[in-house]
């Protein structure tokens, strides 16, 4: 089952005092694991499938009453697709999203060296879809997960390896994957003896900082970066929020227009809100023992005219 939360942007101002409404837009058969969400410029949703096969779905006009998940591409050579991010357009009339995926024995149990990166292009005016492989990544890649684009750069994305504990830099034109760009073991490595080897997970860039979750630490960190997406000189990770007193796991997240963070908790079946100023947090949808957003893995915002 897969639920997507629809809320007004104004809800962020009251998120610490009340829960937010939600509704299920679409769902697939039991045993399906959907992973990541991205929003197209027209408001359509793109959704990646992690298990039991690698595919990307769309939900067209999710604000309408009736919705469905439509498969638009599949990658038969792998079993799982993880992170997905839109890059700055390199050609007029083309929307490009980059995603990573690989083989798995079970959801969360990945096969080292099986990962790759692909791009999906939506070409107007007929909305034609094209898929192309970008890279075989590193043979040592264990669990490629979160993906984020660098603002105003069309040929580079950052990719998190949750098991190896780093965020690498993928050159889209050459397929070169630099695994040394962001390597901070204390803030990125998996927690010792965690049930799954997942450290750094969701990644986002905002206001010249790279943010990431460390899943089983239940923490969010950030580091200052250059306009080209490298760490600034002498910069070190900064702890933004520690939710470990009440949260067991943090997955992907998104910022609202005020810089507040909404994060999915996966194992805790909820979405949490972190205030940008006070760093206070609260569960705003779902909770342990609830099915409202059971297994929540991703959060995304969109409003007409603004992604």
Image (cartoon, helix red, strand yellow):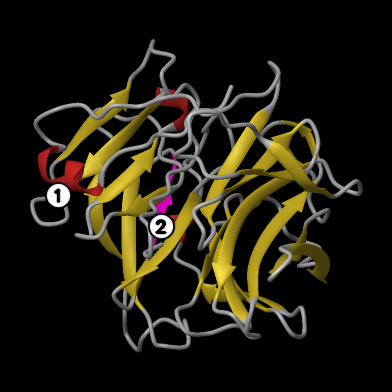
Decide whether residue 296 is among the magenta residues: no
Name the spot of residue 240 as percent of width and height, x first: 23, 56
Image point (30%, 38%), residue name: 7
Q: Nearer the viewer, residue 58 or 2?
A: 58
For this orientation, the residue located farthest to the top is: 289
For this orientation, the residue located farthest to the right is: 77
Quadrant of the frame with the C terminus: bottom left
> Local crowd at mark 1 within 10 Å, few (<14), some, or many (≥20)?
some
As helix, strand or loop, the secondary structure at mark 1 comes to loop
Specify the label residue 212 is tagged with: 2
Name the spot of residue 176 as percent of width and height, x first: 74, 80
Relative height, residue 261 to residue 151 (above, below)? above
Q: Which residue is mark 1?
A: 279
Whether residue 145 sits left or right of residue 133 in the image: it is left
Q: Nearer the viewer, residue 214 or 13?
A: 13
Q: Which residues are magenta?
A: 211-215
Q: Earlier in the sequence, mark 2 or mark 1?
A: 2
Of helix, strand and loop, which mostly describes the magenta segment?
strand
Q: Could you tell me if residue 243 is visible in this image?
A: no
């Amino acid at each position: 089952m897969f639920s997507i939360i629809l809320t007004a942007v104004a809800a962020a101002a009251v998120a610490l005092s009340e829960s937010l409404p939600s509704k299920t837009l679409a769902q697939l058969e039991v045993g399906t694991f959907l992973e990541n969400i991205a929003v197209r410029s027209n408001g359509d949703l793109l959704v990646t499938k992690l298990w039991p096969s690698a595919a990307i779905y769309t939900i067209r006009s999710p604000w309408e009453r009736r919705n469905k998940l439509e498969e638009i591409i599949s990658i038969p050579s792998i079993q799982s697709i993880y992170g997905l991010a839109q890059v700055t357009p390199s050609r007029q009339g083309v929307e490009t999203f980059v995603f990573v995926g690989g083989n798995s024995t079970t959801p969360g149990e990945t096969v080292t060296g099986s990962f790759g990166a692909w791009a999906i292009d939506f070409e107007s005016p007929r909305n034609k879809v094209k898929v192309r492989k970008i890279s075989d990544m590193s043979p040592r890649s264990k669990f490629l997960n979160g993906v984020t684009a660098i603002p105003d750069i069309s040929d580079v994305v950052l990719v998190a390896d949750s098991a190896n504990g780093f965020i690498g830099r993928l050159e889209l034109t050459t397929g070169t994957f630099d695994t040394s760009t962001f390597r901070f073991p204390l803030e990125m490595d998996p927690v010792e003896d965690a049930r799954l080897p997942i450290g750094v997970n969701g990644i986002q860039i905002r206001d010249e900082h790279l943010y990431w979750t460390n899943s089983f630490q239940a923490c969010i960190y950030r580091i200052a970066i250059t306009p080209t997406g490298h760490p600034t000189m002498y910069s070190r990770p900064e702890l933004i929020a520690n939710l470990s007193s009440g949260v067991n796991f943090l997955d992907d997240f998104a910022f609202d227009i005020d810089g507040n963070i909404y994060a999915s908790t996966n194992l805790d079946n909820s979405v949490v809100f972190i205030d940008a100023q006070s760093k206070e947090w609260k569960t705003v949808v779902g909770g342990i023992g609830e099915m409202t957003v059971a297994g929540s893995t991703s959060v995304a915002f969109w409003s007409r005219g603004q992604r």
